[in-house]
Image (spheres, helix red, strand yellow):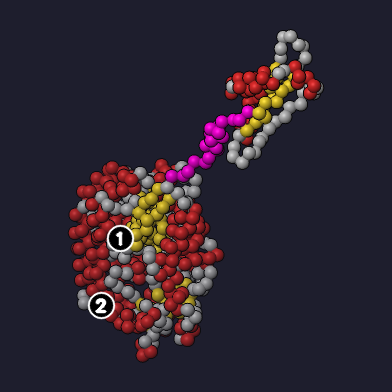
Amino acid sequence: MEGGHRCCIDIDCGVDPALAGWRTEGRMRQMARDLTRRRFLKASSALGVGVAGAATLAACGETKVVEKIVTQVVEEEVIKEVTKEVQVVVEKVVTQAMAAPQPKTVEFEFVSDHVSGVRGKSTTWALANFQAERPDIKIKFTPQGGGFDDSFGIRIAAGSAPATALLSWGFFGSHQDSFVQINDLLDRHPDFDGADLIYEPDSYTINYDTTWPFVDSFQGHAFGLPYQGNVSGHYYNIDLYDQYGVPEPSADWTYSNEWLDAAKQATDPDNEIYGTRIGGGGDIHYWTPISWGFGAKQFISSDGTHTEHFDNGGDRGFQFAVDLIHRHGVSPATDAQRELAGEFGDAFSAGKIGAELRRGDAKGNAVISIGDRFRWALAPQPKGDVTGTVAVHRTNQGHYVIDSARRQGVVEPVVDFLVGMAGPKMQARAATDRGFLPCRWDALESPENLAAPPERQDLLVSFVRGEFRTWQGYHPNQREWLAWRGRAHLAMTGEASVEEAIESAVNEGDRILRQDVDLLNKRIERWGRTA
């Protein structure tokens, strides 16, 4: 060992040093040369040092060895100390045995369109936090703009897709064979419990739950985990209601009675103030719960061939929504809504709307936009005129394990990432930033999520626990609603009657659904129904 340090064990046998004269100096040098490693260990054993003692000596690099020499001529014994250098290689072996194994680092690509605003803030936090906790997993984050489904489909076809991405339930339904089933990994993952999650079937699992009411507990064939939730809701401008003498919304209100009366009372078109706002186009969350309150059951028929939303009274609900613009005048026309929004992004944030029936979650941007210009709160949702119950539209965009993860051999670390993104820390952060609805019950009911603004944030829990419908993502062409929503919108703009708009929307929806009904039936036969 370098530095001249000596590590010794001295053993005192109580022998008179005068007895050392029994051996000549030449004899001692010869014995020292003859002391091999085997004899050293044997001598150590004879002296009671043993293997552990020998290891201690070896580890110190240099040792003072006590040698016991016995002759046949003289009965007295002599103990002689001999200094012996231990080979440096012994020290190297000990060092190598004690070294901790270095963890293997894996890397994979992750794609998401949560890149700006409060959602981008949550993504940035999540990636930094996960990287700190799991330095053995390196994530290459690729930001995307919204609506990247088409380009993503090209990447899948070309075999260049990332290992995981934030995608829609409709994309999942269209490309089922491009994803990896992960039930076995989830079943043995120490941090996963499906009961913790707010669950919608056929969104990131395969269930073929074709008839409402839908199951709400985690089950089926899993190919991903939830992340970004959405739920319809109701919220109002407290100061505007006070100004016009409108009573506080009550849980007993129905759409065509008290709620409509309040919208009329809060409408003052001369001052560009309206009691509510109904949006058309792609944002059908405004009026779909109204249709369900009038008796509609679900978006797609159980056999997968028909756009069913306007059946069973759904057409009457849609008529009521259109009348809010063209008959009652309590909602601004669709082409006037952007002008009313001004610099604030939407007409409600601009202080021009009394109450809205839209998303109950994702209020982070509105909180920033509204600031302290007026007080606002969530409100109980109106009951359906026909059903007498509250209906909500609930969805979730999840993170999915794509087949490229299997080819790259990174399925397990990708699952670790997905569990983390749906875990308590990340979803608590989502509750703080409020860019979307948390996908966990504990985050939904956390103090961070229930804190104002807006006031009455506690009602968000009742929205989520309400009678919900969700997109039926199992259908290969579930995104038929992207085609028919524009046709329904023509009634909102006044370019078509309600009857004409519904007929056009249903015909287009049915045409698209029936294109792949054979594929749907083959998939049901393959996977079976788990709900």
* Outermost residue to the bottom: 270
Q: Position of residue 198 (x, y in %)?
A: 44, 56
**Residue at (33%, 78%) from the top-left corner?**
324
Mark yes or no: residue 11 visible: yes
Q: Position of residue 432 (x, y in %)?
A: 49, 66
Please state which amino acid type lies under the numbered disc 2.
Thr
For the record, the magenta segment spans 84-104
Q: Position of residue 116 (x, y in %)?
A: 38, 68
- Number of residues whose C-alpha sits closer than 10 Å to that of mark 2, classed few (under 14), some (14–19) or many (20 or more): some
Q: Residue at x 28, y 71 (%)?
A: 281
Does the rendering let one see residue 258? Answer: no
240 horizontally vs 328: left or right: right
In the image, residue 429 above or below residue 82: below
Tell me, yes or no, whether the highlighted magenta stretch contains residue 93: yes
Determine the residue positioned at 40% across, 45% down: 412
Residues packed near mark 1 inside 10 Å, few (<14), some (14 to 19) or many (20 plus): many
Please tell me which of labels 2 and 1 falls first in the chain: 1
The percent coordinates of residue 91 (x first, y second) are 56, 34
Q: How many marks?
A: 2
Looking at the rendered structure, the secondary structure element under dot 1 is: loop
Is residue 257 positioned above or below 104 on the image? below
| Residue 299 numbered tag | 1
Residue at which label 2 appears: 493
Magenta span has 398?
no
> In screen coordinates, is 254 left or right of 474?
right
Q: Given contact means CB atoms under 8 Å apart, are the residues at marks 2 and 1 in contact?
A: no
Amino acid at dot 1:
Phe
| Element under disc 2 | helix
Between 99 and 277, the residue placed more toward the observer is: 99
Residue drawn at the location 41% of the way across and 79% of the way down: 349
